[in-house]
Image (cartoon, grey):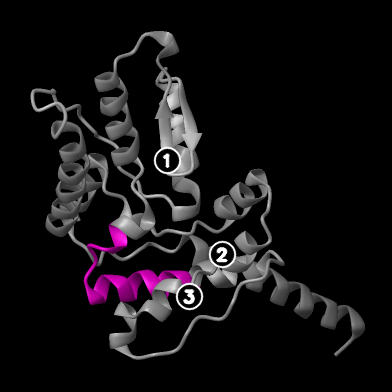
Amino acid sequence: MTTSGRRVVVAVTVVACVLLLAGCAEAPALDPLGPQRREQIRQSILDIHWADVVKDYPDALRPEVPAMGPVTDHDQREVVYTCLRASGIPASRTDNGFRYNSSLGQSQLEFEAEKYVCEATSPSESEVVSYLSGSSRAALFDYQRKIVRPCLLSTGAKSPAPPDGGPAYYQSAALAAWDPYMQILAAKPRSRDVAYFEQRCPPLPPWLDLSTAELSRASKR
């Protein structure tokens, strides 16, 4: 084979590899939950969060939460804080969550209602995972192992190898402690750097979305 011929083969191989990675990142996700179980999880999370409000305000009117997309545990606090501030709530961060500052005249109930909406709109990954069955956890693990980690490695980021184990391992503490992003987060990166990796390699699969729009799409499959 001539030198020019070898170059063509190498070029084609590189393009094929790039397309393969892109295909993996954009491959249609399975739906291990199904619309009925997704709705059950959604309603359970909403009920638990609203219970924190009505224990102090039993006559409070429950706001609608049409969008409900889980975020990673690392991101959730900042996402909720940003949501509160965007809603006009003068909240400030504390070690355990958020503090309400009444400088703009909102009542404590208004703060609690907005906090409910913001937290329910973006539940943490660990909260949603606590409702998953063994097969759903296995699907999440496969997504992180087969899609997220290879994607991170392709960007030059470090990502630890996943633990080994059989089906029972999907419920284990060792697996729960593994995260393809753990080495990135351990380096205490800037928020924009984390956002860059998460945009390139979404840490959570689309089927974990609990929004009403997602429920409608799932019911038509």
Q: Foreground mark, 3 or 2?
A: 2
Front residue (pair 218, 64): 64
* 2 or 1: tag closer to the N-terminus: 1
| Callout 3 amino acid | Arg
Residue pointed to by mark 3:
145
Q: Quadrant of residue 174?
A: bottom left
Disc sitting over residue 106 in the figure: none
Check whether the beta carbons of the residues at disc 1 and disc 3 lie within 8 A of each other. Answer: no
Magenta-colored span: 128-146
Q: Quadrant of the N terminus?
A: bottom right
Query: Callout 3 environment at 10 Å: few (<14), some (14 to 19), or many (20+)?
Result: some
Q: Quadrant of residue 118?
A: top left
Does 214 appear above or below 8?
A: above
How much space separates mark 2 and mark 1, taking CA atoms?
Answer: 23 Å
Residue pointed to by mark 2:
181
Q: Main secondary structure of the magenta part?
A: helix
Determine if the magenta segment contains residue 145: yes
Residue pointed to by mark 1:
97
* 3 or 2: tag closer to the N-terminus: 3
